[in-house]
Every structure is written in structure tokens, then in C-alpha cells.
């Protein structure tokens, strides 16, 4: 199994983010789960890649050429694929992955997980999407998504389709048990 991991190119202000990311990477490696990620060596991106590699796992990075040239590409992973731009990066990661998870991160992390979540809602894929809710990081966002549903902009089944997890075990159990909802407009 390959899981696409979206997370910050920064480590954030709380050491719990880094600790949880390291623990998740170790768990993935121990379970024989490969990761696909943005290819960086900085922030939580570098942390997850290093944790998986240090524990004997496999890591596949996909990085746009312009970021590779800024010397943030991680050379110590299983494979680093260089692509033209962010659009190509996201498409390659989506194709390679069996599931998607967002760890703490910024706007780019949100953009990536929301895109694959939208694609799932529209039936472009039937792969699970998850928020790894370290220290309640995603609670305000998830409350906003629920507000969107309550206001009539998102059907509850599409709110409920995304996994909300706090541990590696919950993540894997949720991925294994995932059943996609009926496609939108069918």
C-alpha cells in the first residue's frame, strides 16, 4: 500500500507535530506501507521521509523542478521524481497513492487534501482521504466543513466520507474499512 502524505514544509510551533510525524513514519515502515509525498527535505515533509527511511521503509517523492533547484529536494529517499510544476506533482501523487492523509501543514497542505477529497466526491477516484488530527490541529477546519454542510453547501455524506484520526492504528483501520459514498450527481 502507498499512502500520499500531505504536510508542512515547516515543522510548526509545537514539538508534538514533529513527534507525531516521526511516530507515523516509523509505523508506516514497520507495517510495510510506502509513502508518496512532495519530495522535500524540510519541515514535516523531511521528518516523515526520514522516519520512514530510517525504519527500513520506502519513500517516493514528487517535486517540481523549481523547488528541486532551490535545494529542498530530498536525495536520501527511495525515489525522487522531478516534474514540471505543481499540477503535474499532484496528478502523479494521486495516481501513485492508494489513500491520502493530511498531517499538520499550511495552505498547500489544505489545497492538496481538498483537491483529492473533491475528486473523491465527484467520483474521479474511490480512495480514502484522511485528516491526521494531531493535538486537535484540524478541529477548527472540520467545524467549518460541518458548517458548510449545515448551510446546505455540502451533503453530509461527503463530510462523513473523510476520515478523522488521531493514531496510526486508527488511520490504517479507517483506510482498510473505507467504503466510498455514492457519487455526486448519479
Image (cartoon, rainbow, N blue to C red):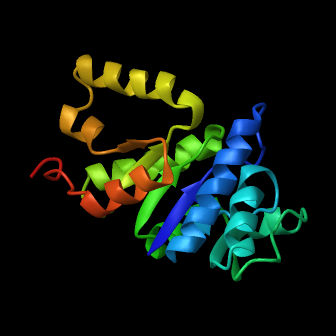
Nearer-the-camera pick, 12 or 146: 12
Residue at 70% across, 83% down: 78
Quarter of the rendering containing residue 105 = top right
Quarter of the rendering containing residue 50 = bottom right
Q: Position of residue 45 (x, y in %)?
A: 71, 56
**Left/right of residue 88 with respect to residue 14 in the rendered view:** left
Q: Position of residue 49 (x, y in %)?
A: 71, 66
**Left/right of residue 95 with respect to residue 21 in the rendered view:** left
Give the answer, above or below, for where 98 lies relative to 132.
Answer: below
Give the answer, above or below, for where 146 lies relative to 39.
Answer: above
Give the answer, above or below, for where 186 lies relative to 141.
Answer: below
Q: Is residue 35 visible?
A: no
Quarter of the rendering containing residue 36 = bottom right
**Left/right of residue 82 with respect to residue 185 in the rendered view:** right
Residue at 74% across, 77% down: 77
The number of callouts visible is: 0
Check the picture and name the quadrant holding the N terminus.
Answer: bottom left
Residue at 81% across, 77% down: 76
Q: Is residue 176 visible?
A: yes
Outermost residue on the left side: it is 186
Give the answer, above or below, for where 93 lies relative to 149.
Answer: below
Q: Position of residue 71 (x, y in %)?
A: 90, 65
Nearer-the-camera pick, 37 or 86: 37
**Left/right of residue 52 with respect to residue 65 in the rendered view:** left
Q: Position of residue 176 (x, y in %)?
A: 30, 63
Amino acid at each position: 500500500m502507498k499512502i500520499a502524505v500531505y504536510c508542512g514544509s515547516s515543522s510548526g510551533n509545537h514539538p508534538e507535530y514533529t513527534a507525531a510525524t516521526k511516530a507515523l513514519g516509523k509505523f508506516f515502515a514497520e507495517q510495510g506501507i510506502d509513502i508518496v509525498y512532495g519530495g522535500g527535505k524540510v519541515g514535516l515533509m523531511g521528518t516523515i521521509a526520514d522516519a520512514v527511511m530510517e525504519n527500513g521503509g520506502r519513500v517516493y517523492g514528487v517535486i517540481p523542478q523549481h523547488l528541486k533547484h532551490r535545494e529542498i529536494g530530498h536525495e536520501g529517499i527511495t525515489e525522487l521524481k522531478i516534474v514540471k510544476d505543481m499540477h503535474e506533482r499532484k496528478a502523479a501523487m494521486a495516481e501513485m497513492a492508494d489513500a491520502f492523509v493530511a498531517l499538520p501543514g499550511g495552505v498547500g497542505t489544505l489545497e492538496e487534501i481538498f483537491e483529492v477529497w473533491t475528486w473523491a466526491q465527484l467520483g474521479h477516484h474511490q480512495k480514502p482521504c484522511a485528516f491526521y488530527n494531531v493535538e486537535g490541529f484540524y478541529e477548527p477546519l472540520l467545524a467549518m466543513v460541518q458548517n458548510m454542510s449545515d448551510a446546505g453547501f455540502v451533503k453530509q455524506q461527503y463530510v462523513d466520507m473523510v476520515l478523522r484520526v488521531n493514531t496510526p492504528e486508527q488511520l490504517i483501520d479507517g483506510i482498510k474499512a473505507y467504503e466510498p459514498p455514492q457519487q455526486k450527481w448519479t
